[in-house]
Image (cartoon, rainbow, N blue to C red):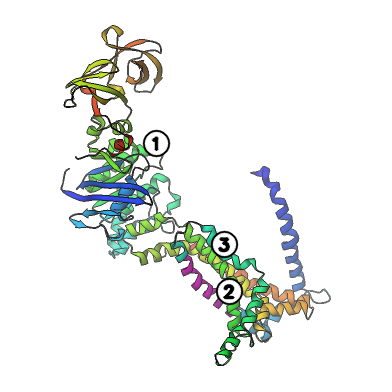
Amino acid sequence: MNTKKWLSYPYTIWMGIFVIIPLFIIIYYGFTAEGGGFTLSNISLITDPINLASLWLSLELSLVSTAICLLLAYPLSLILHGMKLKNNSFIIMIFILPMWMNFLLRTLAWQNILEKTGVINTFLKLLHLPALDLINTPGAIIFGMVYNFLPFMILPIYNSLSKISDDYINAARDLGANSLLTFLKVILPLSLPGVVSGITMVFVPSLTTFVISDILGGSKVVLIGNIIEQQFKTVNNWHTGSGLSLVLMVFILFSMAILTKYDKESEGKNIW
Amino acid sequence: MAGGKLIDLMGITKKFGDNVVLDNLDLYIKENEFLTLLGPSGCGKTTTLRIIGGFENPDSGKVIFDGKDVTKLPPNERPLNTVFQKYALFPHMSIAENIAFGLKIKKKSKTYIQDKIKYALKLVNLEGFENRSPDSLSGGQQQRIAIARAIVNEPKVLLLDEPLGALDLKLRQDMQYELIRLKNELGITFIYVTHDQEEALTMSDTIVVMNQGYIQQVGTPEMIYNEPKNAFVADFIGESNIIPSTMLEDGLVSILGTKFACVDKDFGKNQPVDVVIRPEDIDLIKEEESALNGVVTSLIFKGVHYEMEVLAGGHEWLVHSTDLFPVGSKVGIKVDPFDIHIMNKPQSEDEEAATPDEY
């Protein structure tokens, strides 16, 4: 094994240059003031009511969209798995297919559909119905998040369901469990690793997004991602932007820690 | 040992696509017997077990359990339990939780469940394993837990699907004795699926030899071994010499042109037949004392006996003997009349698989 160690060098170098070093740069900026002296004011900027409200809204919207993704993805994965289709790669392709189109384009398309003069409202107008306020609402952002991140929830769940051997299900049935009990006591607990990675893969990009809220939220709904983006691009203050990024990173690490802890506990432990 | 009919399979047919796995199979299983379904892979033995367990529905035919038609019942409503080939212990539960699974579903009391876990672990010689996790156990231990998990439910029948297939030889032999002991202690019916003829001979009360979806022969291990009904059974159960011959008259058969006395009757005169002779039933004697002579062409020491091949009458005879005859020695072949088993010749390959059987 050791002889092949050099194969990992390019990856290590890549990680160092493009992940570790930038991370340290962000930490440096986050803890320094304009002149270069050490300060905590960039970090404490999160307590500013506007920033705090944005962070809170971000957490709220990403939690809601993660929950919706989970509620949609789990039954869908179950159904897909139950169909026992021979061609698994075909199913996976169906989910990947929307991702072949640019993320930005997809979101812009939804902007077109939801707009005041967009597809839906034009249609409603034809029917002489009142126009709806769809765009620039939290709902529109949640919709965009769910639409964009749903595949990241379905794939890991579908994957973990496929990995459950039929033997376990047969054994549960054999020991007297009906379909519902078999699901609750065997299938659900054994699919939790997929659920956990699905949650991570939807929650983290939802929490940090600024593109979706930019396009579907206009300037009305401002998420923490938008505030950080503004610090870097509009205000041009790298120090405050980095400070807020670090706070957000803490939140992500914290939520991931909870998830992995739960994931570990679910293995080989009592779920009854 | 013999009780009434507990399970009755009537005219079971099962197809997977165009592939007929079981064709109009009839079989009954008596109470308290250790019945083994034996055959090569693809013979339909596992499908038969899965139909009894309720994991597979037959395309036609009935499964009668204890006088009731259970053909359409799901597995969880059948009074039997299964030990799966790959153990199928729930990886997210401890050993105790695995064993308690069925009992908790039946809403048994806590103390009852605790007692049962203790009892079952003792029965399979794994006391104190309650809080271990399944993947910390060896294959043999996992298999014992799988058995414990099944028997705490006090099933009337225990189905075992090649349960020893994944174990190494020594462990497999130990587990064979273990299973016989369990069967005797529990006094329940065991239905066992295997492709290993030695396993079947060691443990079973009744062996059902299957091939290509048909039952070839049903009988006790002695019957199956000593009186195979056809060439397939003879060949599958142990090693044997199967030689195309001619039945001259009752009690006289011509094997490779040499007349041998036998005990079989009613085959008619000058009828082509197959003769089965077990390698250990052949005595090698001095050339001048035998009508059929040959030369030893190979010799292998097998521990208990020597395995020799003797070219005689144009046929390679497989011979097991404790006497040593070096390669090249000229020998005579002698077989006692009751060691010569005569079987009807199949008319075609299809018939060979489908040899109809009433038993």
Dot 2 amino acid type: Tyr
Dot 3 amino acid type: Met
Mark 1 is surrounded, within 10 Å at the Cα level, by few (under 14), some (14 to 19) or many (20 or more) other residues, namely few
Q: What secondary structure is the stretch in magenta mostly built from?
A: helix
Residue A241: image quadrant is: bottom right
Residue B327: image quadrant is: top left
Residue to which mark 3 is pinned? A93
Spot occupied by residue B67 in the image (x, y as percentages of width and height) = 17, 55
Quadrant in the picture for the C terminus of chain B: top left
Query: Viewer-proximal residue, B260 or A179?
Result: B260
Residue to which mark 1 is pinned? B169
Q: Which chain carries label 1?
A: B
Dot 1 amino acid type: Leu
Q: Which chain carries label 3?
A: A
The residue that appears at 62% across and 67% down in the rendered structure is: A99
| Co-location on one chain, circles 2 and 1 | no
Q: For this view, does A169 lie left or right of residue A49?
A: left
| Disc 3/disc 2 C-alpha distance (Å) | 16 Å
Magenta segment: A59-78
Residue to which mark 2 is pinned? A147
| Residue B342 against residue A126 in the figure, above or below | above
Q: For this view, does B189 lie left or right of residue A23?
A: left
The residue that appears at 64% across and 77% down in the rendered structure is: A109
Can residue A257 be seen at all in this image of the molecule?
no
At mark 1, the secondary structure is helix
The residue that appears at 31% across and 26% down in the rendered structure is: B242
At mark 3, the secondary structure is helix
Can residue B335 be seen at all in this image of the molecule?
yes
Spot occupied by residue A18 in the image (x, y as percentages of width and height) = 74, 62
